[in-house]
Image (spheres, rainbow, N blue to C red):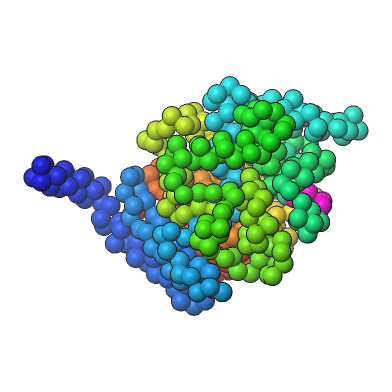
């Protein structure tokens, strides 16, 4: 038996050597050094960096402090606020319902959510919105609802947020422009909950069950929407939120963590984020999500120009920079951003145009390059709105270093 195990190990090593993975792992030292330097310099309190190719994890490193007030170090067991990386999880839950014949990307949204049709005679664009528009951020819905902060300050439940989304304006003809929208992904989750559960009642609970069951079937073992007390102690504390100390602070307050937002409320171990993004690479197989569904999610569906700065300027995502000119093309799959031909703030300049990924306002990044079988995850606990990822093109440089290691 021991001899057989040794032969198996030698065979696996030989395969990895032929593919050059051992050499790649060594060349990734410069990427590792970048992240280590950011922690040492105080740019970010803590971080996790994971890189894989095929089934081989080439890098898994943790640095710094997960919670500065409690002096808790970042480890493999840390739960990170991944913020908007929750969105492709919600998109995957929707596509799992498509696989089951419960939903379609192209059915008018008003068919599944009749409340969205209110005022459609005066606002006819509403009848044209489909889940495909929501999943590609081209629906015309704004980033957040008008009363987002008011609801958070009053500790409103998640169902109140969904109800407010039903009333939101459609700011332009669906499909015309790209406008990143948490509202849209909230409505996607409501569609999942109503069709996979028992209708309107307890739709969000049904959504959580679908999403977590899907994650488990994809191999994600440690992810939670509504953390209990023990899980709360494992969560990294996000710095630089701009809401420090408030009892509705994004990512950190017990109230926020009780909401389970389907657009930004998931807490996950770094290794499990890597497992999730890797599930969309070629050669992966899972009964949880069909190959057609996974391919549609990572394949460019649209690439419209970004909406002008004058469109819903007070309802944009916190990572929006109004001083930057609108992008001429913003490629999206269904729930995943696709790099396309332009340089990316977090997928860099060297990844293939088919690379896909997502970032989170908590300072989290997950992306993959299908043509290289590569997946990369960087989780941190300093909010994106501090602009540390784009200052000196930090996260773009990291992606470039990772791609350079493949040469």
Q: Quadrant of the C terminus?
A: bottom left
Residue at image position (82%, 51%) is 146
Frontmost residue, 46 versus 407: 46
Residue 246: give x, y in percent of width and height.
72, 67
Overall secondary structure of the magenta section: loop
In the image, farthest residue toward the front: 229
Compared with 381, 159 (above or below) is above
Residue at image position (42%, 32%) is 286
State which quadrant residue 318 falls in.
bottom right
Q: Quadrant of the N terminus?
A: top left
Residue 336: give x, y in percent of width and height.
56, 43
Q: Is residue 353 visible?
A: no
State which quadrant residue 81 falls in.
bottom right
In the image, farthest residue toward the top: 101
Asked whether, in this view, residue 120 is left or right of residue 395, the answer is right
Asked whether, in this view, residue 175 is left or right of residue 78, the answer is right
Frontmost residue, 159 versus 387: 159
Frontmost residue, 134 versus 80: 80
Is residue 147 one of those drawn in magenta?
yes
Is residue 95 one of those drawn in magenta?
no
Chain part drawn in magenta:
144-149
Asked whether, in this view, residue 342 is left or right of residue 216, the answer is right
Q: Is residue 296 visible?
A: yes
């Amino acid at each position: 038996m021991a001899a057989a195990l040794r032969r198996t190990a030698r065979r696996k090593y030989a395969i990895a050597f032929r593919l050059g993975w051992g050499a790649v792992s060594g060349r990734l030292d410069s990427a590792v050094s970048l992240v280590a330097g950011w922690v040492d310099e105080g740019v970010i309190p803590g971080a996790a960096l994971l890189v894989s190719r095929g089934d081989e994890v080439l890098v898994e490193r943790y640095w710094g402090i997960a919670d500065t007030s409690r002096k808790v170090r970042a480890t493999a067991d840390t739960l990170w606020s991944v913020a908007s990386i929750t969105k492709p999880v919600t998109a995957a839950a929707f596509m799992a319902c498509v696989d089951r014949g419960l939903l379609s990307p192209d059915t008018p949204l008003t068919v599944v959510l009749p409340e969205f049709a209110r005022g459609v005679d005066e606002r006819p664009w509403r009848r044209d919105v489909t889940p495909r528009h929501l999943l590609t951020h081209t629906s015309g819905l704004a980033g957040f609802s008008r009363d987002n902060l008011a609801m958070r300050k009053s500790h409103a439940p998640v169902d109140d947020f969904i109800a407010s989304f039903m009333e939101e304006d459609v700011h332009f003809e669906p499909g015309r422009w790209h406008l990143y929208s948490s509202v849209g992904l909230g409505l996607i989750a409501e569609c999942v909950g109503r069709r996979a559960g028992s209708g309107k009642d307890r739709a969000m609970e049904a959504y959580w069950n679908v999403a977590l069951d899907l994650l488990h079937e994809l191999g994600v073992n440690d992810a939670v929407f509504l953390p209990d007390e023990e899980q709360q102690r494992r969560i990294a504390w996000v710095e630089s939120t701009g809401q420090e100390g408030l009892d509705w602070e994004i990512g950190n307050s017990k109230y926020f963590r009780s909401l389970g937002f389907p657009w930004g409320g998931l807490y996950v171990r770094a290794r499990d984020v890597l497992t999730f993004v890797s599930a969309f690479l070629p050669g992966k197989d899972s009964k949880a999500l069909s190959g057609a569904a996974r391919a549609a999610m990572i394949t460019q569906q649209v690439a419209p120009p970004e909406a002008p700065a004058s469109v819903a300027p007070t309802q944009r995502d916190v990572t929006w920079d109004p001083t930057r000119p609108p992008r001429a093309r913003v490629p999206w799959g269904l729930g995943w951003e696709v790099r396309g031909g332009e340089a990316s703030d977090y997928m860099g300049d060297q990844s293939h145009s088919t690379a896909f990924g997502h970032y989170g306002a908590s300072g989290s990044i997950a992306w993959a390059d299908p043509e290289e079988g590569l997946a990369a995850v960087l989780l941190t606990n300093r909010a994106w709105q501090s602009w540390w990822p784009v200052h000196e093109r930090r996260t773009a440089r990291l992606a470039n270093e990772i791609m350079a290691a493949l040469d």
